[in-house]
Structure formats: C-alpha cells, structure tokens
Image (spheres, rainbow, N blue to C red):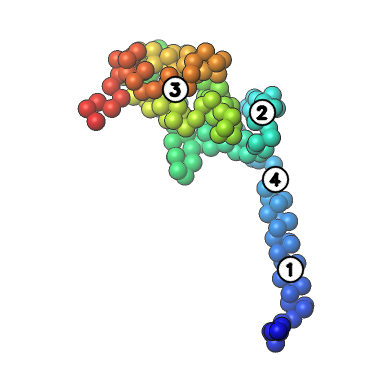
Amino acid sequence: MLLINKQFSPRRAFQRAMLCVALTLLAACASQRPLAWPDELPEREFFELAYSEDVRNQPLQTRHEYLGWIKSFYNGTVLYPTGWFDVQERVLATAAAANVETLRPRIRELGMLIAAEWAKENSERAIDNRLLALWGSTLQAATPGEQRLEVFELVVSDVRRLLDGELEKQAIADSRYDELLGLDSFGDF
C-alpha cells in the first residue's frame, strides 16, 4: 500500500533537488579553487616539482592535497599547532650569534627537504609524524649556542641519509640523539 503525504509538492521536491545539486556543485568548485600560497612560504615551484617527479605518490594524492600539507607543515594545524616556522624561530633565537646567519638558509633548506617528503600520502612517505616531532624537539632541546649547530648538522645528515636510502627510519630515535650528542631527552621519566 502506497501512502501519499498530503503535503507533498512536486514543485517543492524539485526545488530541494536543485538545491542539493547546486550545493554539490559549489562544494566541488570550492575544492578545485587555486590554493593560496602565502609569501612567507618557500617557493611553491620547489614543491610543485617534487610532486610532479613522484609518480608513486600522484595516484594517491592530488597536487592540491599535497600543497595543503606543505602549508600545514610550515604553519602547524589545529591538532599540532607548532609548525616549521616555530621550530626555525626557536632554533635561530637560541643559536650562537656567530652561527645565526649560517643557520638561517640551511634551516630553511632543511625545512623544504622535510616538507617535500612529509607532505606525501602516509603510505609513500619516508618522513612521518614521529620523525617530524623527534627532529623538532631535538633541535629545540639542544643546549643553546654551539651544541645547537652540532645537533642541527646531525639532523641534516639523518634527513639526507634517510631520503637517499642510506639510513632506515627505525634507526632514528631519541636514544640515537641522546647517545650521539649527550642529550637526555626524557631524563628520569
């Protein structure tokens, strides 16, 4: 038995259907809008090239998604508000004065290397959130001054060796930095 709603209106049903179609199209168009690229971020072309050259990641992630993660890397997110800009600022603020001008372009380059890899789809990236958090905290935990440069050099070496396939992700842990640099990441915790 078919029950008919006495308040059913074909015109009203058509209007609702058109509204749903319009909202769907609007959402689709909004997701295709060009991604704004803030001036303070490194050159977009560097990341565009990194995305274009990675044929394994492209089927898993759109260019828009990838570039969105690059922005999150630098600025932080709601869940992880500390971005690379914050790490850079803290490292440079506590580095030995004589090292600041040497470190500035190098920490920028390090950020670009890490971001280009970290922004990939999870299954394709060599640098995950654990490594990102470890490197950020290690760089910030080093004693201000000359040790900051030593820690920085080790992190740069580990990033490059990891990306070149010379170092396994599992080998990079807080105990590695504690041992090599005489740090005590967790103390008696």
Which secondary structure, mark 2?
loop
Left or right: 81 as drawn, with respect to 188: right
- Frontmost of labels 3 and 1 is 3
Residue at the far front in the pictured view: 1
Which secondary structure, mark 3?
helix
From where the camera sits, is residue 92 visible?
no
* Above-or-below relation of 61 to 99: below
Residue at the far left in the pictured view: 188
Residue that label 1 marks: 17
Q: Is tag 3's residue or tag 2's residue first in the polypeptide sequence? A: 2
Quarter holding the N terminus is bottom right
Q: Is tag 4's residue or tag 2's residue first in the polypeptide sequence? A: 4
Q: Amino acid at mark 1?
A: Ala
Residue that label 3 marks: 170
Q: Residue at x 49, y 41 (%)?
A: 77
Residue at the far bottom in the pictured view: 6
Q: Residue 56: give its label.
A: 2
Q: Residue at x 62, y 35 (%)?
A: 66
> Whole-Å distance between the Cαs marked 4 and 2?
24 Å
Relative depth, front residue between 82 and 100: 82
Left or right: 135 as drawn, with respect to 73: left
Q: Residue at x 28, y 22 (%)?
A: 184
Q: Residue 33: give its label.
A: 4
Q: Is tag 3's residue or tag 1's residue first in the polypeptide sequence? A: 1
- Frontmost of labels 4 and 2 is 2
Relative depth, front residue between 131 and 151: 131
| Quarter of the figure with residue 62 | top right
| Residue 167 position in % (x across, y down) | 49, 15
| Residue 21 position in % (x across, y down) | 74, 62
> Whole-Å distance between the Cαs marked 3 and 2?
22 Å
